[in-house]
Image (cartoon, grey):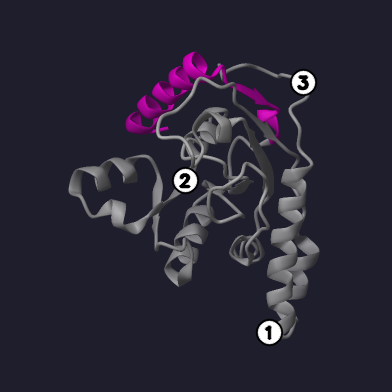
Amino acid sequence: MNLSYFIAWSGFNLIYRTLFRARFYHAERVPSHGPVILAANHESFIDPPLVGCGLRRPLNYLARESLFNHPVAGAILRSWNAVPVDREGGGGRGLKAILDRLERGGGILLFPEGTRTSDGRLQPAKAGVGLAIIKSSCPVVPVRVFGTFAAFGRHHRMPRPHPISVAYGHALDFTALREEARTAAKPRVKAIYQAAADAIMAAIGGLQPCREVRRFPG
């Protein structure tokens, strides 16, 4: 972690520990180094740093391109490994940026649902995350956040001191779909992207916090 990332990581850890009594389960399932995609459900604005706080390694995060327009804010976001993408979080440039971070050995956090849930329930996965999965060659780890919708969901103006937690799953193997996509016809390739997205969303849905490995990294 660079200094800016470490300061933010430490600050968010303190906030989550004191205000939300955060717990992290099975963070050891995430590779400690090398390229990896983390795919998580999305309940709140607080989800991205929360997922990162359970890990000793830094992650790369997607952020709206417009947020980088301000020189100071842009510099801070870049120091936190934020990846600028368009409003929809996709497009050719967005995919290129994601794959570039992975090729450099980084970990990146993606949200298959594309946006925050409006009712606290899991939403269907969009094909965009499947595209990133199939175009890459790295492990894909499902992640599920719990409690952040109640703590700071769309319907809240201010966060509430509600318990939150993160469960990290076992990495999924997409070798077969990646191989098929290399020679498949275009309609089938699109179906493969959606199949990969659906598979990671199903894995997220199957995660539950069970045994606490450690409350906070350290």
Binning the other alpha carbons within 10 Å of mark 3 as few (below 14), some (14 to 19) or many (20 upward) gives few
Dot 2: element: strand
Q: Nearer the viewer, residue 134 or 127?
A: 127
- Dot 1 corresponds to which residue? 186
- Dot 3 corresponds to which residue? 211
Which quarter of the figure has residue 207?
top right
Dot 1: element: helix
Disc 2 to disc 1: CB gap under 8 Å: no
Where, quadrant-wise, is the N terminus in this rendering?
top left
Does the magenta portion include 7?
yes
Question: Looking at the image, is 61 positioned above or below residue 58?
Answer: below
* CA distance for labels 3 and 1: 43 Å
Dot 3: element: loop
Q: Is residue 71 left or right of residue 200?
A: left
First in sequence, mark 2 or 3: give its number: 2
For the stretch drawn in magenta, what is the main secondary structure? Answer: helix
- Dot 2 corresponds to which residue? 60
The amino acid beneath tag 2 is Asn
Binning the other alpha carbons within 10 Å of mark 2 as few (below 14), some (14 to 19) or many (20 upward) gives many
Picture coordinates of residue 65 (x, y %)? 34, 58
Name which residue lies at 34% across and 29% down: 3
Question: Looking at the image, is 103 positioned above or below residue 127?
Answer: above
Q: Is residue 203 left or right of residue 93?
A: right
Q: Which residues are magenta?
A: 1-29
Where, quadrant-wise, is the C terminus in this rendering?
top right
Q: Nearer the viewer, residue 47 or 55?
A: 47
Picture coordinates of residue 56 (x, y %)? 54, 28
Disc 3 to disc 1: CB gap under 8 Å: no
